[in-house]
Amino acid sequence: MSESNELIHLQPVFHEMLWGGRRLETVFGYQIPDGPIGECWAISAHPHGDCRIEGGRFDGLLLSELWDQHRDEVFPGACGDRFPLLVKVIDAAQDLSIQVHPDDAYAAEHENGSLGKRECWYVLDCDEGATIIVNQNARSREEFAHMVEEGRWSELLHELPIHPGDFFQINPGTVHAIKAGTLILEVQQSSDITYRVYDYDRPDKNGNLRELHLQQSLDVIDYDAPAPDSGAVQAPEVDGVCVLEENDSYTVERVRVSGAKTQRNESPFLCVSVISGEGTICGEAVEKGVHLIAPAAVRELALDGEMELIVSHV
Ligand code: ZN
């Protein structure tokens, strides 16, 4: 079977969240269901939101089916038993819970073989004065548990101001929370394992409190993780390309396009998200809000126009 060089378009999956809003519709023009919609799973093969392919040779297949049935044609050289990345847009109209994620080893043992969750955030937009929580100030399990018990949240949590264009890498074990008034592009391992530390004692639409997972949180928190002072991007931009993060799970780049350029691809796939402007990718017209996968056979991604992309791959 010959390799496929078609760009892969996907139907996003939307998730209602008690902290969600309407900006996925007002800012990106997505057709979203009624209610507070918090997340657009734009590129996902996770069972909690498996995207369906739209158009082309693989029209109608789920991304997980494409991975299982056509891996050698579309993603030659890819390893693992599932499409490894998940790309989301998050609209936080209210604060997300204070949470932490396990690493692969803990998740494999305690969560039915799931992947752990390493994630990163690119701040697309935020309200004036918006903040975020990345890391915490206790240096041991005992100290953390004690501060939680006494409800000393503001002392415990490391909160910092954010600005559009900021970037944060969130490793497993790092306590974190996206706060109200924030629109974020998230690239993460394909996992949905979240341990909630604190949810502000707020009820959901049925009047119930969401479950907390303090014991698991205490198990997985990295008490030595360094806390960032800001999310300002320090990495250099070379020919429009800035490598925001590179680790064992993913590489994430911001690509600024002004005119024609090509972006080399040496990975089994590229996840491409257009975060501003418009132009073309391999001759196809795209605009802000489009997400697609370029398969391995696209060795050179031909880009043209005036736009900004987030490109992520393994
Ligand atoms: Zn998270």
Image (cartoon, rainbow, N blue to C red):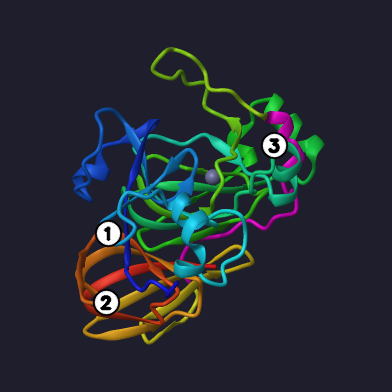
Q: Is mark 3 within 8 Å of ligand 1?
A: no
State the residue position of label 1: 290
The verdict on residue 231 being magenta is yes
Above or below, 304 relative to 69: below
Say which quarter of the image contains residue 166.
bottom left
| One can see residue 138 in this view | no
Residue 52, image x, y percentages: 35, 48
- The reply to whether callout 2 and callout 1 are in contact (CB within 8 Å) is no
Q: Amino acid at mark 1?
A: Val
Residue count near mark 2 (Cα–Cα under 10 Å), binned few <14, some 14–19, many ≥20: some
Q: Which mark is residue 217?
A: 3
Q: Which residues are magenta?
A: 214-233
Above or below, 72 relative to 128: below
On screen, residue 95 versus residue 57, left or right, reads: right
Q: Ligand 1 quadrant?
A: top right
Q: Give the quadrant of the C terminus.
A: bottom right
Residues at marks 1 and 3, CA–CA distance in whole angstroms: 35 Å
Residue 292, image x, y percentages: 34, 62
Residue at (42, 75) in percent of width and height: 2
Mark 1: secondary structure: loop
Say which quarter of the image contains residue 275.
bottom left
